[in-house]
Amino acid sequence: MASPEGAKDIARAICAIFALLVLTLATNARAQDPDTLFSQAVDAYTKNQFADAQAKFKQVSGAHSQEAQQYLTKMKSYQDAMEVAKSAMNRTPDEQDANNLAFAIQQLETAITIKPDGPWNPADQLAKARALKAQFDKTHAAGSRAMDTQFCAKALDAAQKRHFKDAAQYSCAVANDNPAYSCGGDEAVHLCQQNTELAKLDKSTPETIPEKPPPPIEAAAPSSAALDKAKAAYDSNNFDRARTLFEHADPDSKATAADYLDKISRYTDAFTTAEKQSRAGQYDSARTLFLAAVVIKPDGPGDPQDRASAMELFLGLDQFYSGDYPSAIQHLQSCAKTGTQKQPLVRFYLGASELAKYFVTGAEDTTLHQEALNDLKQAKQAGFKPTGQDLSPKILQVYKDLSF
């Protein structure tokens, strides 16, 4: 039998354990409280602890659930922009070009718009991308001018000999680089169009070996005429012809040809898979793949930038009809900035999303209300008619009453 003192020690130990258990349960309860969990998630987001923030935001329910979803969308867009920009900037020197670096700059600016102090130092990366582009432009300016001069001379010579297929190849390569370049007193873009039309009547076989090898170009790697034609076909998005020419490149050009063949393969795979996912309604993953194609060739066949913008539109429409108005606004705003098609539709649903958010949040945000009216006015000025759309009568009435 325990002594009185021993009994007191046991009682104290039991009390301590009980107190610890109560404290643990209280801590867990606070952790699961929606307000506390949302605050912790916002704190993690502020500290750029995205993995922790995403895990917590996904658990938030109740009054903060819509805000949590908005944060998740912002983080996803931020991460996508940073990853795409990094991929574009990390291309090998022989794959790098001005359009690619300009696209990286655009993506970094998008990331900074979302979170200026976000992870991976977006401001520093933007400065680096701009410096890379400036250096690229400086380094390649002389080589580009020399290449345009050389290709122009070849185009004029081929046209004089009535070899219009060769003339079209060379003049169109110049036009892709500099449409306004003066070649024989004519703009390269017009010369390209003219030779392309004449080439349709040209029954001769295009030349494969030049009369003499092209002179070396300063600041640019020497290449055979066949390789020049392959690159011109690639630049003009004639991938089938480019692939055939690169596959038959001479031994000295094999390495360069292999790089181009890899780019064609990766671009085609990304674009084809993106189209399949788009048809399956997987718009987010399709958008990511279209952007991957943009990194490889921004002006590639099928206009991947425009297709990515279309996926942004579909995401915005899905979120609008799901009642996630903050996410819909973000996607539709991005679409309005980068998309070139269906702008009246984009503006209408952007205004409708802003107006719906204004109503559900108590109709107190006058700035949001004015933004909604401005976007709806743009849609109405463009003649957009929301016939057959499943929309709130309240929103439709506001649209009907708009005057401009």
Image (cartoon, rainbow, N blue to C red):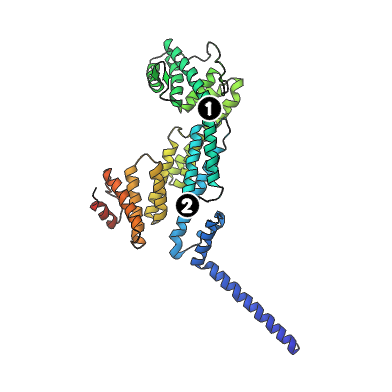
Q: Check the image and report above or below for 22 versus 277.
A: below
- Helix, strand or loop at mark 2: helix
Q: Name the residue under label 1.
A: 140
Q: Name the residue under label 2.
A: 74
* Residue 92, image x, y percentages: 58, 33
Q: 233 left or right of 377?
A: right
* Residue 307, image x, y percentages: 42, 39
* Residue 47, image x, y percentages: 55, 56
Q: How crowded is mark 2: few (under 14 residues within 10 Å), some or many (20 or more)?
A: some
Q: Nearer the viewer, residue 290 or 190?
A: 190
Q: Is residue 268 visible?
A: no
Alpha carbon separation for disc pair 2 and 1: 37 Å
Residue positioned 48% across, 33% down in the render: 99
Q: Check the image and report above or below for 377 versus 358.
A: above
Q: What residue type is labelled 1?
A: His
Task: Give the image quarter of residue 86.
Answer: top right
Q: 92 left or right of 235?
A: right
Q: How crowded is mark 1: few (under 14 residues within 10 Å), some or many (20 or more)?
A: some
* Residue 152, image x, y percentages: 46, 17
Verify CB contact (< 8 Å) between mark 2 and mark 1.
no
Task: Give the image quarter of residue 44.
Answer: bottom right
- Helix, strand or loop at mark 1: helix
Across the whole image, how many numbered discs are drawn on residues? 2
Residue positioned 58% across, 73% down in the render: 25
Residue positioned 57% across, 70% down in the render: 27
Q: Which amino acid does label 2 sit on?
A: Lys
Query: Mark 2 against mark 1, which lies toward the viewer?
Result: 1
Residue 180 is tagged as none
